[in-house]
Image (tube, rainbow, N blue to C red):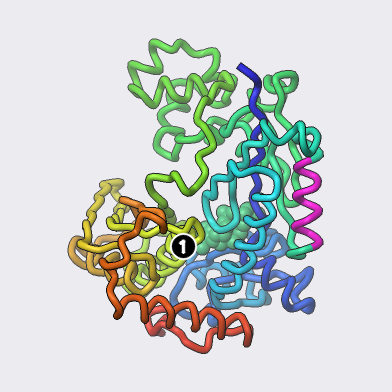
Amino acid sequence: MKERSIIHVDMDAFYAAVEQRDNPELKGKPVIIGGPDPTKRGVVATASYEARQFGVHSAMPLREAYKRCPHGVYLPVNMHKYQQASKHIFNIFQKFTPLVENISLDEAFLDVTGSRSLFGSSKSIAREIIDQIDKEVNLAASIGISYNKFLAKLASDLDKPKGFVVVSADNFYEVVHPLPVKRVWGVGKKMEQQLRAVGLKTIGDIASASLFSLKQQFGLAGEHIYALSHGIDNRPVIPNREAKSIGRETTFSVDISDRDVLYATLMQLVEDVSFRLRNSNCWCQCVTVKIRYACFNTYNRQTTLSQQINLETEIYSEARELFDSFYDGQPVRLIGVTLSHLKAEKEKQVELFGWENEKKQALAEAADRLRTKYGKPLVVRARGIKKD
Ligand code: DCP
Ligand code: MG
């Protein structure tokens, strides 16, 4: 089989970088997104690299961020702006290959195996992509290039910001094996501890462990991490049109039981997944909400709808209802939203929507256009405004 060329692109400090781009006074300053008032409730969506030097990072409560970086510039999430930038970036990817899998607003896999004859090596394609993002969107990205998805993603994270890392069969052992086990896809905190307990600290350690004992201890996951530690990952890049579901989850750095913070986070997740849904010209008919409590007990609840939806307001209302139906007030470690039963636009049955929904859709698009024109949301959802 021909060796594949996979590029993973992940934008640097995405939301913060968009704000710095749009207000040059913020360049070089610690910018924290998730405000606007750090003394109030909420979590950090992201922080510029300048702010990270003070120990501020995503999913940290704003109050903690403020303690670490009181002189930072705190800004609210302006999702519409980030969605616009994201759309622009994804359009650039499409110029090089139709095999683009959008993972989130700022992250995608590109399979450029078939594009090399047209555009040159995967490295030159990646350089061209970075150049175009820089010139047309005025933002910086980190790139990982390799022969599979796992290694490409790993590579893009190795030298952030503005990283450009190639993992090939030649440098695989040297680059990958010394890395800690937590870099392996699927190894969370709990598994990391379990691996440590049996003396496996690096990816190289996993590779030299016995497959039998890994399978005994971790089942299928053991087999999975063993294969990855040997650089084996055959998962294809699935263009989003064919995606079966679109999901996003957030792990809080401190467990949260404040409902306002949980609702605001739920809204951010809904904004992200619904944008990706519409960006793939899809509708969904099933919404799932996931809650992992501090004790690691994890629950998923889903609702299947009688009609297909793709608007934030509709999806949030389903997600919120689900959340309220099973959240029991305990501290939450992680929440997530997944959309499934996806249908492409062309398959959608127009009569299911009827005149009322067509009107809402047109209204949402009109509101989007207004926001683009005036650079700020003129029509806002009340739930997106965080309470004190
Ligand atoms: N995000 C969020 N909540 C989180 C994590 C991320 O709202 N817990 C948002 C803000 C980020 C964007 O998603 O800007 C992309 O997430 P990344 O994990 O890629 O983080 P950044 O792009 O901000 O930084 P990095 O340079 O580490 O990729
Ligand atoms: Mg990023």
Name which quarter of the figure residue 255 lies in: bottom left
Q: Is residue 51 left or right of residue 296?
A: right
Q: Position of residue 144 (x, y in %)?
A: 69, 39
Mark 1 lies on a secondary structure that is helix
Q: Nearer the viewer, residue 65 or 309?
A: 309
148 or 163, which is in the foreground? 148
Q: Relative to residue 235, is residue 141 depicted above or below?
A: below
Q: Nearer the viewer, residue 360 or 376?
A: 360
Does residue 333 show up?
A: no
Residue 132 among those drawn in magenta: yes
Q: Is 156 on the left or on the right of 280, as rendered?
A: right
Decide: is 362 above or below 163. Answer: below
Number of numbered discs present? 1
The C terminus: image quadrant: bottom left
Ligand 1: image quarter: bottom right
Residue to which mark 1 is pinned: 278
Rendered position, 127 above or below 333: above
Q: Main secondary structure of the magenta part?
A: helix
Q: Give the amino acid at mark 1.
A: Arg
Instruction: Provide residue 273's location: percent of width, then percent of height.
Output: 44, 59
Residue 15 visible in the current orientation: yes
In the image, taking residue 203 as reference, residue 349 lies left or right, namely left
Q: Which residues fall within the magenta stretch?
A: 125-135
Compared with 105, 35 (above or below) is: below
